[in-house]
Image (cartoon, rainbow, N blue to C red):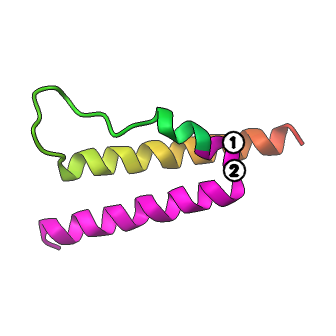
Amino acid sequence: MNKNDNIQWLTKKILKITVEIQKKFPELYDLLNETPLFLSDRKRKITIEDFRQYLLSIRMQQKTFEKNSRINI
């Protein structure tokens, strides 16, 4: 996969998880605004690794929220 394919794939995964969170857990979706794609002040470009880290971050939030939702039922 080339760099553009990787970015496109990661972007699609991020969108898919974001939409899933929006539908299943609207309260968590509201909190995603507080989970921005963090970038160093030294960076001028968003890297593939930045996208990967963001994807991992929202996946972990989703899994944690799902787990806590089941416990509270």
Residue 21: within the magenta? yes
Q: Quadrant of residue 12?
A: bottom left
Residue 56 is tagged as none
Residue 25 is tagged as 2
* Crowd band around label 2 with a 10 angstrom C-alpha radius: few (<14), some (14–19), many (20+): some
Q: Quadrant of residue 21?
A: bottom right
Q: In what quadrant of the picture does the N terminus appear?
A: bottom left
Residue 16 location (% of width, % of height)? 49, 65
- The amino acid beneath tag 2 is Phe
Q: Quadrant of residue 41?
A: top left
Q: Nearer the viewer, residue 29 or 65?
A: 29
Residue at 45 percent across and 35 percent down: it is 35
Q: Is residue 70 left or right of residue 7?
A: right
| Proximity of marks 2 and 1: CB atoms separated by less than 8 Å | yes
- Position above or below: 53 against 5: above
Q: Is residue 22 left or right of residue 53?
A: right
Dot 1 falls on a residue whose secondary structure is helix
Q: In what quadrant of the picture does the C terminus appear?
A: top right
Spatial separation of the CA atoms under disc 2 and disc 1: 5 Å
- The amino acid beneath tag 1 is Glu
Residue lying furthest top:
41
**What range of the chain is rendered magenta?**
1-29
Residue 27 is tagged as 1
